[in-house]
Image (spheres, rainbow, N blue to C red):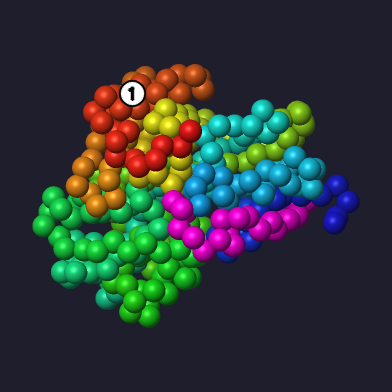
Amino acid sequence: MTDNALRLGTRRSKLAMAQSGLVAEAVSRVTGRPVELVEITTYGDVSREALAQIGGTGVFVTALRDALLRGEVDFAVHSLKDLPTAQPEELALAAVPEREDPRDVIVARDALKFTDLPRGARVGTGSPRRMAQLNAYARAHGLDIETVPIRGNIDTRVGYVREGQLDAVVLAAAGLNRIGRIDEVTDFLSVDTVLPAPGQGALAIECAADNAALVAALGELDDPSTRAAVTAERSLLAALEAGCSAPVGALADLLADGPNVKEMRLRGVVGTTDGSRMVQLSTTGPVPQTHEQATALGRELAAEMLVQGAAGLMGERAL
């Protein structure tokens, strides 16, 4: 351990290490201190069960947070979509840096686009949200696909296609971007086709809430527009009482009139994994200037979705 170095807690996966490496460089720039990565294994990394079976919520986060609370690391980096929506009082979400591309992408054999997949094509994903929306799109457009539940890191998932076990897999554009493999994408899925997970493409930087100096230093990396967007998305998820493995998609984006940003639009979707029933709504309001305003936007849309029957489409709700 270098004297004066800050300890950054990270998962061990190639993607997590790449994300944390980028944050480490940025933190070192704003603090003038070296940053050393401390690798931590989480329950989600070692379990081979489907995320929906092990609860999804917090399985990639709890071990990192425990290390923070024990003082073994100074701060931690998470994929924001993995964070439970309830924030522990002892920890501060010190920064949400500028978001990467939030879209989902297809990596398919023979460079195929999603709509060009052959009849009976097997499409792998570990996400009930992706299954629900891909199956709904297929139903609406006469496509014949079979969604297949899978687990594993990016290498494992892409390997299923390379080895001929699957025709395609669905991944997050942000992850492939961060490890330098975006050129393997054969199709970018429009958010009109598949809404991403709440917070997808964004990172979360957490530290102890009582370390005011570090909270302030890490706050230099915060992007207000990204924070407002993901706050609205996660507020919707929380108001639906759904965990991060539920079939819920949400995306908030800023609507501009030329150079002037006028409003924020929040879109939400929930559906059964077979795509047979979906509730998809949107709302538009002034760009939130506070955490409370962003939270209210999410709650309002969630309330409308619940009126339309969203609760019945999510299976067991996360309390």
- For the image shown, how many numbered marks are present on the structure? 1
Residue 219 x/y as whole percent? 65, 33
Residue 104 x/y as whole percent? 36, 53
Residue at image coords 76%, 29% = 210
Left or right of residue 153: residue 33: right
Residue 60 x/y as whole percent? 58, 51
Q: Secondary structure at mark 1?
A: helix
Residue at image coords 56%, 50% = 59
In this rendered view, identify the residue nearer to me: 243 or 249. 243
- Asked if 272 appears above or below 286 in the picture, the reply is below
Left or right of residue 173: residue 215: right
Magenta segment: does it hold 50?
A: yes
Residue 128 x/y as whole percent? 36, 51
Q: Which stretch appears magenta?
A: 28-53
In this rendered view, identify the residue nearer to me: 19 or 183. 19
Magenta segment: does it hold 122?
A: no
Q: Place residue 181 in its image quadrant.
A: bottom left
Left or right of residue 290: residue 260: left
The residue under label 1 is 303
Furthest-right residue in view? Answer: 3
Specify few, some or many for label 1: CA neighbours under 10 Å numbering under 14, 14-19, or 20 or more.
some
Left or right of residue 34: residue 248: left
- Asked if 279 appears above or below 295 in the picture, the reply is below
Residue at image coords 62%, 41% = 205
Looking at the picture, which amino acid does disc 1 mark?
Ala
In this rendered view, identify the residue nearer to me: 142 or 53. 53
